Amino acid sequence: MNVHLLMAQVLAGIANGALYFLVASGLTLLWGALGVVNLAHGSFFMLSAFSAAALMEAWGSGAGLALAIITVPIGAALVAMALERTLFRRVQATGMWGQLLVSFGLVLVLNNVARLAFGTVSRSVSPPALFAGFVELFGLRIATYQLVVITLTVGVALYLWYLLVRSRTGRLIRAAVDDPQMLGAVGVDVRKLRTAVMGIAALLAGVAGVISVPRGAVNLGLDVQIVVIAFAVIVIGGLGAVWGSLAAALVIGIAEAVSTMFIDQGSEVVIFAVMVLVLLFRPTGLRTIAGRA
Amino acid sequence: MQRFDRASIAPLALLAILLALAPMVVPPSSLPGITRVLVFAGAATSLNLLVGATGMLSMGQGLFVGLGAYIVALGTIRFHMSLWTSAGLAVVVAIPLSALVALVSLRARHMFFGLITLAIGQVGFVFVSRNYSLTGGDDGLTGVVVPEWLDNDVSRHFLALAVFVLVGLLLLRVLASPFGAMLSAVRDNPNRVASLGANPKVFEFAAMLLAGCLGTVFGALWAYTQGSVEPSVVSWVTSAMLLMMVALGGRSLFIGPAIGAIVLELSRTYVQARSSNGDLVVGSIVIACAIFFPEGVGVALRDAVQRAKGRRGARADQRRTEGGAIQATENVA
């Protein structure tokens, strides 16, 4: 076996896992802390990827990417918050079933909107010249783009850590993970918190969507593909556990990338194999809020 | 608790009569669409054995529908089996498969259980869609061989109707049995069931076996009525559609999933024939139903019927007592 090839695959897996973490971390907070199951989370990712691809085609890949990374996630967050206030809030009282129905309907609607706005042809935009090359590091050739993805994800993870540990919103979110009823009872407006977390989650999905564009093949199947992977990450990492989902996303990303060295096709199966294996030994995931799964 | 008497069979019978009249009412070209609604209604009703009766959120029913469809397609096309042999073989294969799925997925509960069943279903989908030599891969299999008596739309429709009614009666009977009572006990409070000396997992396991086999039956029916199978039957799309039919129609009602299937599948067929943006309309319908009828269209329908009955009864009361019975009914409403 070629050690260099293995290392390259591991790195590609880490870069993919970083994307999965960005998508799953918001979803796990939203579900674990505030009880919102949002199947349409992957649609935010897909719409962001399409918007970024369109911007990069219109403005050139450098300027387009710079513009997209600033505007698209914010746009995704605003859309998500509007949807939370108009749709999700109405079905909150009816529990999980209303949310499943609403978000499934949203998956269909947003997919159709994407098809109308961006067409059915899958898009590939090459990364800006600055990120297209390779760097030599410890005798390994590493794609600059992968390094950028990993760096950006580390940055977002640090921001998330700061948000959760230091800010007031973060304290409230952590309180909601522990005991949502008590949080409401002491006078915190849990509904507003829900809207805010929905926004943050969509922001993270938006970032992931934008930086996934140079990976290639932005297509209409991305929404479900990524949300299924994100749910697998949540299941493995444990509900409501941001750092559990980081570990799970990296495990999944690496397992998926390394498996392509041994099997030709069907690397998705590896994700689910990992998921089933973890759950056989730990039915509530690596880290979770005991009893609330 | 579900009972097996005239009142509980009546909605099923009414639906069956309406669907039996369909070949005389609708234009012949849209009859296959109605037949497909029937197949979906049956598959959703079998899924509701898990979702509504036992409280298990299965997202992998498509695996069994696909299993039935593919075994029948493979059996008749490649191995020249007859209708009954291939359908029987499908059910026989479904037993160990659903046992395996149950063994793995029953490790977890609620949404996590659902996500594991979804994952297992996707593994099946990848297996089917990549395996070109056996299952035809993405292209699927076309040209399911049907016996001569089944070679027209009307007889296919009545075959589907017959299977739907038979399975519906079977399920109603099962739900009315002591076993069915145990299933609803497991749904309402598994801990209490355990403390009373029964193992809730055994009942969940049995429910999964039965639902898996019945899902396979409707998969076989799918292959016979559609004439072709494709990998999307196995994928999450089918599982999610079936689950949405259950939720949309009302999981607490036996006839609910069938109503959900009619609403969802008929509107989809209708819109798709006229425009390419069917998802936009169907998605909007799903969202609207979730907001206006959170417990399901079927439940809202039943309440409306009961209110109408109550009002008629109240009017009779009023004639007798001149009291405020209408007021009372309207307060309840």
Image: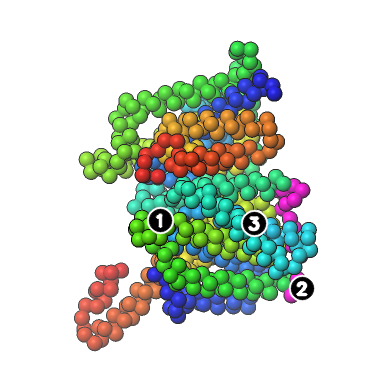
Instruction: State the SS at label 2.
Output: helix
Task: Look at the image and tell me in which quarter the C terminus of chain A lies.
Answer: top left
Report x, y in % for residue A96.
Answer: 41, 51
Magenta-span inclusion, residue B134: yes
Host chain of mark 3? B
Q: Quadrant of residue B55?
A: bottom left
**Residue on which disc 1 sits:** B291
Q: CA distance from mark 1 to mark 2?
A: 47 Å
Please tell me which residue is depicted at 36% across the width and 78% down the height of the picture: B309
Please tell me which residue is depicted at 37% across the width and 39% down the height of the picture: A289
Q: Nearer the viewer, mark 1 or mark 2?
A: 2
Discs 3 and 2 lie in a common subunit = yes
Host chain of mark 1? B
**Residue on which disc 3 sits:** B67
Q: Is residue B273 above or below residue A179?
A: below
Q: Which span of residues is magenta-colored? A: B132-149
| Side of B47 relative to B310 (left or right) | right
Please say which color scheme the image uses.
rainbow
**Residue on which disc 2 sits:** B148
Instruction: State the SS at label 3.
Output: helix
Q: Nearer the viewer, mark 3 or mark 1?
A: 3
Does residue B229 appear anywhere in the picture?
Answer: yes
Host chain of mark 2? B
Discs 1 and 2 lie in a common subunit = yes
Q: Nearer the viewer, mark 3 or mark 2?
A: 3
Please tell me which residue is depicted at 50% across the width and 66% down the height of the picture: B259
